[in-house]
């Protein structure tokens, strides 16, 4: 779920498409994929919904990334109901690296990061293209896994990428990724008001990431 500047709540479902909730009227508007209509949602199975600093809605689905500008008129109604689809093209190295989009995050510089099950993508707004980062077997400083489930930033604006095999911290200046919590599936990450980064795993409990000592402290059921 994500809330836009007009106060609409956007809710992604897994099979029922996208829903816009209007708290003023307590009603829902539904958006679904329509066969043969390229301006509709690309897929009804939604993994992620994100409103960026420009009030643009990004929707990550089982089959493609979608961009939607929920600009509203004076009457509060959405005027532009056109989705722009971004799909993987094996013949285009600057396309999305994979169609299954699990995570979307915008950093403090306004750069949009897209996590897929086929690598991390940096979106270039100027030319509408992507730079992809993937696991490289001959590069120990590359991304440790291609299946990305969550992306978060911290107080230093460092980028943290969680996925099928732990957490990677991105060193964007040196184009390297440092590995934390090797082996754990990281399904969600968030930074709290004190600047502490928390990671929720798929079976290994909750972890607090200690950046000072490059460790993760687990909290498990007792």
Image (cartoon, grey):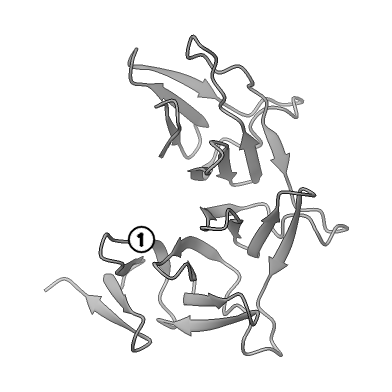
Decide: is 102 above or below 167: above
* Left or right for 120, reference 158: right
Image quadrant in which the N terminus is located? top left
* Left or right for 112, reference 39: left
Which residue shows up at 29% across the image and 73% down it? 207
Which residue shows up at 73% across the image and 63% down it? 131
Q: Secondary structure at mark 1?
A: strand
Residue 150 at what x, y percent from top left? 47, 61
Q: Nearer the viewer, residue 110 or 97?
A: 110
Image quadrant in which the C terminus is located? bottom left
Find the residue positioned furthest to the left: 222
Find the residue positioned furthest to the top: 75
Residue 140 at what x, y percent from top left? 62, 90
Which quarter of the picture shows residue 146?
bottom right
Question: Dot 1, crowdedness within 10 Å: few (<14), some or many (≥20)?
Answer: some
Residue 211 at what x, y percent from top left? 36, 81
Decide: is 176 above or below 41: below
Residue 155 at what x, y percent from top left? 39, 67
Name the residue beneath numbered marker 1: 190
Decide: is 222 above or below 215: above
Decide: is 152 above or below 211: above
* Left or right for 167, reference 198: right
- Counting the numbered discs, the total is 1
Which residue shows up at 63% across the image and 29% down it? 33
* Left or right for 134, reference 45: right
């Amino acid at each position: 779920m994500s809330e836009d500047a007009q106060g609409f709540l956007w809710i992604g479902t897994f099979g029922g498409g996208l829903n816009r909730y209007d708290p003023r009227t307590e009603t829902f508007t539904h958006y679904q994929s329509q066969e043969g209509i390229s301006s509709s949602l690309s897929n009804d199975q939604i993994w992620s919904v994100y409103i960026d600093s420009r009030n643009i809605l990004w929707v990550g689905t089982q089959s493609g990334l979608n961009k939607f500008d929920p600009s509203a008129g004076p009457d509060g109604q959405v005027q532009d109901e056109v989705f722009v689809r971004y799909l993987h093209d094996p013949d285009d190295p600057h396309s999305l690296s994979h169609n299954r989009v699990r995570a979307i995050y915008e950093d403090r510089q306004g750069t949009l990061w897209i996590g897929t099950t086929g690598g991390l993508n940096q979106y270039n707004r100027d030319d509408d293209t992507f730079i992809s980062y993937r696991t490289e077997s001959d590069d120990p400083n590359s991304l440790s896994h291609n299946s990305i489930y969550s992306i978060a930033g911290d107080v230093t604006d460092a980028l943290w990428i969680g996925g099928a095999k732990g957490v990677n911290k991105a060193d964007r200046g040196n184009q390297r990724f440092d590995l934390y919590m090797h082996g754990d599936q990281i399904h969600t990450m968030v930074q709290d008001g004190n600047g502490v980064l928390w990671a929720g795993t798929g079976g290994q409990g909750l972890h607090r990431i200690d950046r000072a000592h490059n460790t993760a402290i687990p909290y498990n059921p007792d």
